[in-house]
Every structure is written in structure tokens, then in C-alpha cells.
Amino acid sequence: MIDENVLERLKPYLTEVSYPKGYVLFNSEKLERNIYFIKRGMARAFVEADGRDITIWFGQEGDVIISARGYVYGEKGYETMALLEDSELYRVNGMDLQDLYRNDIVVCNWARRLIEWEFVRTEHHLIANLSEPAADRYMQLLREKPEILRRVQLQHIASFLGISSEHLSRIRAITKNRTK
């Protein structure tokens, strides 16, 4: 997602960090201005509703971990971001990044494209969850990001698809039989 030219411009602002599986990068209770790029590992964003976690995003190598409200409004986010695997990340301070935007049009344009891409991805996920059958959403996830199905617990995948773990198990059994 990040091209070499932009990466070179960002390097002076990046700090490489490592955290274990389960580490919470962002908590919905506090303002988070740091932005992370996943070098190695997996992450998920989730919100709590009715006493349960609802997964709203998965990130993997090359993805950006960002709290939209912290980034845009300087407010506490509504999501919690946790690592699903031991991970290596690049961290950049959001204020440093804002300064870089003011002084480097290449980085500024890259950030704009990144936000546009994330907006479309989020919109697509929302529309799919509201209009497509769960089996179709599962098959799309299988086509677009098969590694998630190998690396993420089924309960988180079910939550992301907006279904119960039992429903996901039935869908998996049906689709497995179809592909044989």
C-alpha cells in the first residue's frame, strides 16, 4: 500500500516497534494520535456492543492502523485495536505526519489516496453486510483475503461477517462440500 518513494520520505519519522499477540495498540478509552504500518503480523479493530466484541476491520502486512477519530478530529476513538499475532510495526507520530503533509506534496497525496481507499473499503463492507447473504460475504472474504481465514480465530471472522460462530461453521461446511 505504501510505495518506495513515500516510504523513503517517511523513514526519518518511523520508529520500528514489536509487540506480542494480544497487545492493545488503541483503546477506545483514550486519544490515539500514533499511526502504525504493519511490517509483520495481524491486527483487528473491534467495538463493544451489547456486551460482545464486533470486529470491524482486519489488518495485515502492508496495512495502516489508524484511529480515524484521533487522526481527523483529535478525539478518543470508538474502536479498540488489538494484535492477533506477535507483530512488528512502524510507528509514526500523527503530529509529525501532519507537519510532513504541509511540507511534502508527495506524502500528502499518498495520505489522501490512502484515506480514499479506506473510505471505499469501509463503504463496501457496510453495504455488503446490509445487503448480501452471509455465505456470499464469506466467499468474498475467502477470495480476497484467504490468509485471514488461516490466521484469524473463527469467532472474529464470524463477528466481522455479522453472524454467529455456529452460522459460520454451517457456511464453511456447505462451501467445503461445494468445492470438493
Image (cartoon, rainbow, N blue to C red):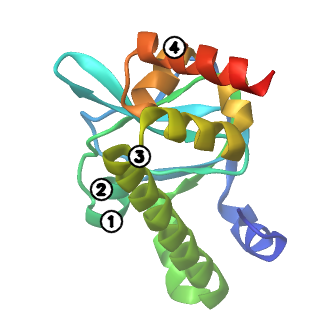
Judged by depth in the image, the label closer to the viewer, 4 or 2, is 4
Q: Which residue is mark 2?
A: 69
Instruction: Tell me which amino acid carries mark 2.
Output: Arg
Mark sitting on residue 72: 1
User: Is there a contact, CB below 8 Å, between mark 2 and mark 3?
Assistant: no
Mark 1 / mark 4, whichever is N-terminal: 1
Judged by depth in the image, the label closer to the viewer, 1 or 3, is 3
For the point 51% across and 14% down, the residue is 170
For the point 75% across and 63% down, the residue is 11
Compared with 5, 149 (above or below) is: above
Q: Which residue is mark 3?
A: 132
Q: Quadrant of residue 124?
A: bottom left
Quadrant (top left/top right/bottom left/bottom right) for the C terminus: top right
User: Is there a contact, CB below 8 Å, between mark 3 and mark 4?
Assistant: no
Q: Quadrant of residue 40?
A: top right
Give the CA distance from mark 2 to mark 3: 28 Å
User: Is there a contact, CB below 8 Å, between mark 2 and mark 1?
Assistant: yes
Judged by depth in the image, the label closer to the viewer, 1 or 4, is 4
* Relative to 23, 86 lies left or right: right
Compared with 166, 159 (above or below) is: below
